[in-house]
């Protein structure tokens, strides 16, 4: 009787395990089917070199935008800040539209017009109803080709940007990352801030803005991207009509190499309640084969905030230690990529007395990545990375942004199923190899703001970037 019960139990376990495997297979098959059925990204190049890329999902709304391969990295010390200044000036009226006319036209469409500047790109985009895409493209083309750049508007916008700089200075995370770039890429264009120094903002004039447009707003460096209810052939026609006269670049855009320097900058301010610290090593560029394993390693370290639950049940070792030992208020790992280099590291906010303990735990986790990370941890990080990848593409605007950025970075849009396969191909040895290559015994860049007296001095930080073991 006992033997029969045992056999029944074993059979039940086998059956349950089989059902579980079938469910997993169906789930994986459904994900594969979903990824393969995502509309293809179509790309067309105009005669002048401008690229048009779109994904038609048949939605009732659409996002269209111009991604320009020029940002603060394309500036020098004298005109640093001009790309961001130009982004502000784009909405201040054109040769055929005053600022009021432009604002009313966008308002009457019920559309949303916006722009932003990064270190390598400037972006102008519009979110609208799919039927209004032709008008949105025409407006975007008008503001990058025919901006008035009037002296009165420049003077008025100067004070707006100076106020924006004051707001950024109150955001300590932004301040720390600016300092991190300044010390990591010192003496190179990537070390410059996006907004530029105050003295430049006070002196930038119409000639600086015009020169920047003439030098960098070339057709071959621009991508017209669209997502949502966008017909690709119609978008190509609109691009030809409105942007076909843009000058083609004779020479390819040059990328000034930006060397990484292991170094530190500390801005001690004991009046602040918390210490804000970032530490990073040199990462890799967008197209480097190490990028995906580094993304998995970055996901493995993870992010944590005191408002989150979990405690001892957190999957991330660093999150578990932070929660149990009250090491910090929050931390987030990052993998910031540029064309030929990058920053891979962590940013954390902690109480002044916890700086040393938190940094010790961070560097211990980094050394563990290099030597002892397990297969189970890597599998979890890969699944989380794939989930985050899909969650970030929720809506026409993030999809359009993904299209524009990838066409500039990779010269193509990487299909989601290909990206998933590349993530799946990463194994525990790949993660250990890239960690050894980029982290182990490397000089880090450190930026710290606030009451940072207890942060170990740089030589001690550097000596914790490797383990001596018998």
Image (cartoon, rainbow, N blue to C red):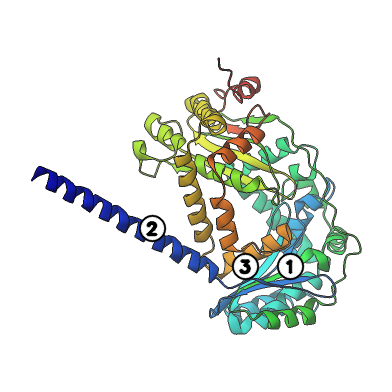
Q: Is residue 168 above or below residue 318?
A: below
Between marks 2 and 1 in the image, the one whose residue lies nearer the viewer? 2
Q: Residues within 10 Å of mark 2 (few under 14, many from 20)?
A: few
Q: Identify which residue is drawn at 51% across, 39% down.
A: 301
The one of 230 and 369 positioned closer to us in this rendering: 369
Measured Cα–Cα span from mark 2 to mark 1: 40 Å
Asked which secondary structure carries label 1, the reply is strand
Where residue 60 sits in the image (x, y, percent)?
Answer: 53, 81
Location of residue 248 (image quadrant): bottom right
Q: Residues within 10 Å of mark 1 (few under 14, many from 20)?
A: many
Disc nearer the start of the sequence (3/1): 1
Measured Cα–Cα span from mark 3 to mark 1: 11 Å
> Outermost residue, left direction?
1
The one of 408 and 459 positioned closer to us in this rendering: 408
Placement of the C terminus among the 4 image quadrants = top right
Disc nearer the start of the sequence (2/3): 2
The dot on residue 223 is 1
Location of residue 244 (image quadrant): bottom right
Q: Which residue is mark 2?
A: 24
Q: Which residue is mark 3?
A: 400
> From the viewer's perspective, is 46 left or right of 180?
right
Where residue 413 sits in the image (x, y, percent)?
Answer: 66, 64
Q: Residues within 10 Å of mark 3 (few under 14, many from 20)?
A: many
Q: Identify which residue is drawn at 22% across, 52% down.
A: 11
């Amino acid at each position: 009787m006992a033997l029969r019960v045992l056999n029944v139990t074993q059979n039940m376990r086998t059956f349950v395990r089989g059902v579980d495997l079938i469910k997993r297979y169906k789930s994986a098959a459904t994900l594969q089917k979903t990824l393969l059925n995502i509309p293809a990204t179509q790309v067309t190049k105009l005669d002048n070199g401008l690229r048009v890329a779109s994904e038609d999902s048949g939605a009732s709304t659409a996002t269209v935008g111009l991604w320009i391969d020029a940002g603060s990295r394309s500036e020098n010390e004298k005109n640093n800040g001009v790309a961001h200044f130009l982004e502000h000036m784009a909405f201040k009226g054109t040769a055929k539209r005053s600022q009021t006319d432009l604002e009313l036209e966008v308002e009457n469409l019920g559309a949303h017009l916006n722009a932003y500047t990064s270190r390598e790109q400037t972006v102008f985009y519009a979110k609208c109803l799919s039927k209004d895409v032709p008008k949105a493209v025409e407006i975007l083309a008008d503001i990058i080709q025919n901006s008035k750049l009037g002296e009165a508007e420049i003077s008025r916008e100067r004070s707006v940007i100076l106020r924006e700089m004051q707001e950024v200075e109150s955001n300590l995370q932004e301040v720390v990352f600016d300092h991190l770039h300044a010390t990591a890429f010192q003496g190179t264009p990537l070390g410059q801030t996006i907004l530029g120094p105050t003295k430049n903002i006070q002196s930038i004039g119409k000639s600086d803005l015009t020169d920047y447009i003439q030098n960098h707003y070339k057709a071959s460096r621009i991508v017209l991207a669209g997502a949502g209810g966008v017909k690709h052939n119609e978008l190509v026609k609109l691009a030809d009509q409105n942007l076909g006269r843009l000058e083609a670049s004779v020479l390819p855009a040059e990328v000034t190499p930006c060397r990484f320097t292991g170094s530190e900058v500390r801005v001690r301010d004991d009046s602040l309640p918390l210490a804000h610290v970032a530490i990073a090593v040199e990462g890799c560029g967008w197209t480097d084969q190490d990028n995906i394993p580094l993304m998995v390693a970055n996901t493995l370290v993870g992010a944590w905030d005191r408002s989150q639950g979990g405690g001892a049940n957190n999957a991330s070792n660093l999150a578990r230690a932070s929660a149990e030992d009250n090491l910090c208020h929050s931390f987030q790992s990052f993998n910031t990529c540029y064309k030929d280099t990058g920053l891979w590291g962590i940013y954390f906010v902690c109480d002044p007395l916890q700086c040393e303990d938190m940094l010790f735990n961070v560097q211990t986790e980094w050394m563990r990545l290099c030597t002892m990370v397990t297969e189970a941890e890597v599998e979890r990080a890969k699944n989380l990375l794939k989930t985050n990848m899909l969650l970030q593409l929720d809506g026409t605007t993030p999809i359009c942004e993904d299209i524009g950025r990838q066409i500039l970075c990779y010269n193509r849009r990487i299909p989601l199923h290909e990206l998933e396969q590349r993530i799946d191909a990463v194994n525990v040895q790949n993660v250990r190899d890239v960690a050894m290559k980029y982290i182990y015994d490397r000089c880090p860049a450190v930026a710290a703001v606030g009451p940072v007296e207890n942060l170990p001095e740089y030589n001690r930080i550097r000596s914790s970037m490797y383990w001596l073991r018998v």
